[in-house]
Amino acid sequence: MDNLQVQKEQKRKLMWEKTVDLFCTYGLYVIFVILVVFFSIQNPNFLSIKNILTILKSASTLGIATVGMFFVLIVAGVDISVASNMYFSAVVGTMLLNNLGCPLIVCFIASCLCGILIGLINGFFVARVKIYPFIVTLATYSVAKALGLFVTKQKMLFLGESSMVLAKSKLFGVSSFVYIFLGVVLIAYYVLTSTQFGRQLYACGNNLEGANKMGINGPKVVCLAYVICGGLAGIAGMLSATNLSVINPNFAQGDEFVVISSAVIGGASLFGGKGRVLPGAIIGIVMIQVIINGLTMVGASAYVYTIFRGIIIFLAVMMDSIKYSGEIR
Amino acid sequence: MNTNKNEYILQLKGITKSFDTVKVLKNITISLKKGEILGLVGENGSGKSTLMNILGGVYQRDGGEILLNGKPFEPTSPKVSQAAGIAFVHQELNLFTNLSVAENLFITNMKKNKFGRINKKLMNKIAAEKMATLGVKDLSPNTIVGSLPMGQRQMVEITKSIMQDASIIIFDEPTTSLSNKEKRKLFEVMHTMKAHGKSIIFISHILEGVFEHCDEIAVLRDGEIIAQTRTEDTDTATVIKNMVGRELTNIYPTCEKEVGEVVFKAINICQEGRFENINLEIREGEIVGMFGLMGAGRTELLRCLFGLDPMLSGEIEYKGVKINPITPINCINNGMAFITENRREEGLLLPKSIKDNVVMTYLNELSNKLHFIDKVAEQQKTDKMVDDLKVKTYDAKKQHVSTLSGGNQQKVIFAKWVLKEPKIFLLDEPTRGIDVGAKYEIYSIIQELAKNKSCVLVVSSEMEELMGICDRILVMHNNKITGEFMKNEFSPENIMKCALGGEK
């Protein structure tokens, strides 16, 4: 090959790389904007303040789980059990509410503890026993779901009138859910950026072996990430239950993928070590909720939503992989 | 002050260490003076890293004495060594590329207030001060390490070593990944540290650097210290002679074979950022050795020839037929075989039986039209190979490869390829980590291959074995072939000189 040809080839390669890079960075946002324009033309109510507030409220519950997912993704893990975790934790919380008449706050604490327990199991097997997170969380996904179905005898659980208080409460016209979500994001942001534990999470996700050599307790840090993810999933589950005021057997089904893709869209990487919850978690979950809401507003069938969800997950993960392969570690 | 200067900060006396039956270190005695730089040179595998791992508390020595500041010192774990003020700067950097410089320096010991909030300002300030003491001023503690060039990352790694107020710093081949300018900077930093009264052990095989910057030079060969002298009392020739000057103790198998015409050619091999127009020819039945020191690019060249790593341009020819495209599958189909240096990771399926490993590349030939495997032929072939190559096993069908000794594992790898009857063998360190007896058998196998008119290219760090089995030796330095020696020209000093970057 002569020099000129080589140079030309390199130039073409560079151009292509640049295009791919641009697509990976802004591609999803472009698709998002196109969809928003499409929805608002199809249904003028889509951009009304009322609808936007609805979107924000519905984004808040899964948004809390997304924040948890950020912790796990940062340590280069993944948690597929979040949705089952939400279901089981919500069932536990609701049963306390219905059968023992516990106050709402106690139910939330119980749900959170229940989620933490599942997270602890995940974390133990991933960090200590060193089994792939995908396998471990797939197992807990199945077990938690089955336990929930067993406890409820596969029947719907209805929440009492008292639980509606929280879901209906508003501050300055905005649902209190949104404030809870923002609070969780802010705390997570503080932990991740301003504490030693937070920085060690990033370190473990970047180079776990190196972290262990440096005297970081790698297994402990990784395990805690799963515990946080589990605990937040528990809260998200109970919150979602009080909003719907009913738990049917397919409660939160498939939401693990919404949560994972929101986190990835928001800047976390499946390869670990990356991601900021502020504004990442908010952007990710809101984007997905906007699409879900928009599809309902234009009267698309439920299947279309599932197809869209699949495509979004695929695009987000694909872009993540492409970006990662260009990175030097 | 003058008396202080002559004080020994660290003395090693009669250190010995064996792994299984292999004596890696035999009676090592060296000493390091306060505020001086000691250069430690030696071939690959001469025991440098084992010695440093003993000092760092990673391995425990079998015998001998370590004196730190004149007092006995027991490095029982890395933590003990660290606390005693011994710090390491490794060749591979241990940094988190997604964190800032200061965060890397403080990762286990961050400055924080009572609410656990980390004090970034304070950490940045201390980091900058520490770096300034090393003369590093152009590096902001706030930068993300991933955005820094290798040289600056090395500076961060070095700074990390002085965070704990170490008094002895060991640099293990720190210059391999650095540009010339970065190297100069590194040496400046070493001298700054020295001026602050720190003592340094500098492990390297780049003699220029060692001669220019060290106060004393110790030469290590085959687990023994050959000489420790003041730099001004020695010269390059003596050091090279000390590095390689061993008697030929091993006996090598010989066999009658004919060397024919050139049949294998690699033409203008280029790889981005590494090789430029490398040419290479092997004759039929010829054994060509490839010598070079760590990082010379030998393994990389083999991987390139076998299509394992990307090649920018270049051609490979066997008997006038081009092998195109150059991918592992196509190379195998054209009669090439590659024996990797990572026996356990890349060469074998450890938890599988010997039989499964031997027939791994031969399954196509063993299966019938319906793609069922002929079990009888499989067993016959395995038995023949086990017999031919003298693999020691009780049952090739049942015994797992993981339970074999290194030498026998290596023979299984050879069996796997020999079964395919390839014509070109690329061998990467075929005798690494195996005992003398097995080495002899491997040499016999290699000779046998050549006798059967195969081309053999052997990469090895043991010059002696190359001189023993090869018809010709190529020497690599800095990703270039710098020398070629025919059998009658073999001389350890000249080959080493080439490997160190000199002219033939």
Image (cartoon, rainbow, N blue to C red):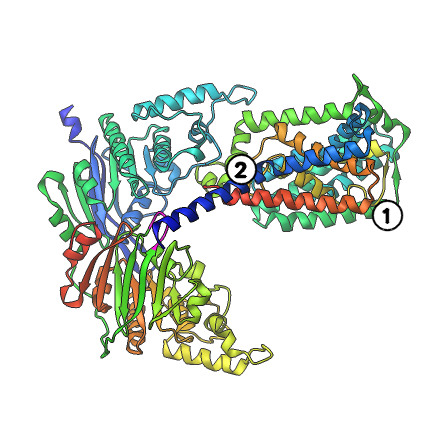
Asked if residue A238 can be seen in this view, the reply is no
Q: Is residue A180 left or right of residue B421?
A: right
Q: Depth-wise, is mark 2 or mark 1 nearer the camera?
A: 2
Residue A159 in the image: state x and y as whole percent: 88, 34
Element carrying mark 2: loop
Is-magenta flag for residue A22? no
Contact between marks 2 and 1 (CB within 8 A): the answer is: no
For mark 1, name the chain. Answer: A
Is-magenta flag for residue B273? yes
Instruction: Tell me the crowding category of disc 2: few under 14, some 14 to 19, or many 20 or more residues within 10 angstroms, Cα based.
Output: many
Residue A13 in the image: state x and y as whole percent: 46, 46
What residue would you read off at disc 2? A273
**Real-space CA distance between mark 2 and mark 1, rounded to the nearest whole angstrom:** 40 Å
Residue stretch in magenta: B270-274
B246 lies above or below B394? above
Between B299 and B158, the one lying in front of the other is B299
Which label is found at residue A305? none
Element carrying mark 1: loop
Instruction: Tell me the crowding category of disc 1: few under 14, some 14 to 19, or many 20 or more residues within 10 angstroms, Cα based.
Output: few
For mark 2, name the chain. Answer: A
Residue A180 in the image: state x and y as whole percent: 73, 25
Report the amino acid beneath label 2. Gly
Report the amino acid beneath label 1. Gln
Residue pushed farthest right?
Answer: A161
Do marks 2 and 1 share a subunit?
yes
Between B399 and B340, the one lying in front of the other is B340
What residue would you read off at disc 1? A154
Dot 2 or dot 1, earlier in sequence = 1
